[in-house]
Amino acid sequence: MDEKTCITPDDLADARERFLADPLALVARNAVSSVGIRPAARVPEGVAANSLDFDIEVSQGKRTNQQRSGRCWMFASLNTMRYRTIKKFNLKTFELSQAYPLFFDKLEKSNWFLGNILDTLDEPLDGRLVSFLLSDPIGDGGQWDMFRSLVKKYGVVPKEAMPETANSRNTRDMDKFLTRYLRGCARRLRESHEAGVGADDLADMRKEMMEEVWSLLAICLGTPPTSFEVRLRDKDDKIVLNGTFTPQEFFAEAVGMDLDAYVSLISAPTADKPFGRSFTVSRLGNVEEDGTVRYLNLTPEELKQVAIAQLRDDLPVWFGCDVDQSFLHDEGIMDTAALDIDGLFGLPIMGCLDKAQRLDYGESLMTHAMVLEGVRLDANGKPTLWKVENSWGEDHGRDGFDTLSDPWFDEYVYQVVVDRKYLSDEQNAALDADPIVLAPWDPMGSLARCQ
């Protein structure tokens, strides 16, 4: 036995002796084993700095709840859109259907997946690319650019026109069985290709498969409406919008957002992603004819500047982050000063990797999308605290709102979506330049999907 590579009885005895001789470790053990890690590491002074007082703030309707689904990116996108409807028509509150885009996202992702399978028929089945494509073809997660593609093609509808179902509230089984069916489709396409079936016949098979996917989704989510009646009443109970609309007509009338003006900005300080350059991710998307995603990589300070500019114009900001890092879930507080994990364990756990290293070593990526709806500024006009609308219901956090500190923004916010009019001429030119193509498994290709 090589004592340098194995855990020996002496190693165990030494570790036990050192631990039992450390009174702070014993106190930490008692606290953590009783209440859990985060409650024991909670810093009251850090929590106290997260009061809901802001210098710039937009006023939203009632909180929404994605329940047991990974639709945060849809809820965040729809929350930025419904704000315009509430404001335009002076409504108390209003909610757009989240089941409607879910239907078409699953449909388009299925078609996107089958297209990727046809494009990789000669790739080895056990190679990294095909294995990646098969791993999660139609998961709930997504990006702003993907939602923009859905709305441009399919529009939006009020929640009443396509309400939630058991399978939109909890997508697990629907995703499970649709994924299994699609993997079976991939097998059929690859085996048909190996047997000499031509491209035209494979394309016909794909069309038949997509009809079957549509049927599966309709059984789970209901049939999406092609037109519907609308009667919106304002705060004074007066009808302010009345008529029959298609989903595209309703988006134009009730939301009226220039979708193509809104662009994705990321902040990734890794060596392979220079700031001031545009990027795309290979094979990431959903709507075949609308292409893939595009980002401009900027510093956190630049992301904050454009986010504040949009908030000043009374418009919320979609953003993506790694939500579980330094997060007090029940209180809705994202703050690096509100949890002292390293002090609790006496180890450099949170401090062992910087932001770039966390991305490079698989410790962090975008997991959740929410909406910035306010910001607190110091005497010099610099942000110190941000107000966040989450999509976990009004019982979460403080009436459904969270806060994130500005240092937390630096470390764990990876993406914001703003009107490109807030970008400088130089930034706009960089965004439009030919993008650097990232691998499908790059962390900037992660999909917001936190439940």
Image (cartoon, helix red, strand yellow):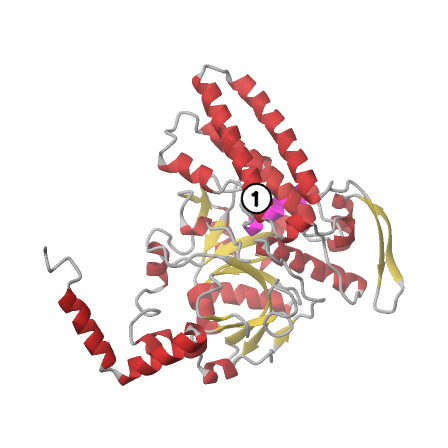
Front in this rendered view, residue 428 or 280: 280
Instruction: Name the residue located 62 percent from the left edge and 38 percent from the top edge.
Output: 107
Q: Position of residue 141 (x, y in %)?
A: 54, 50
Question: From the image, which quarter does the N terminus lie in?
Answer: bottom left
Q: Position of residue 442 (x, y in %)?
A: 40, 48
Residue range of the region highlighted in magenta in the rendering = 143-153
Q: Which residue is mark 1?
A: 175
Above or below, 96 relative to 387: above
Q: Residues within 10 Å of mark 1 (few under 14, many from 20)?
A: some
What type of secondary structure mainly makes up the magenta span?
helix
Instruction: Name the residue located 34 percent from the left edge and 51 percent from the top edge.
Output: 272
Above or below, 73 relative to 10: above
Image quadrant where residue 154 sits? top right
Residue 151 included in the magenta stretch of the image: yes
Residue kind at label 1, given as amino acid type:
Asp
- Whether residue 123 can be seen here: yes
Residue 24 included in the magenta stretch of the image: no
Instruction: Name the residue located 54 percent from the left edge and 78 percent from the top edge.
Output: 377
Report the side of 306 relative to 59 (left or right).
left
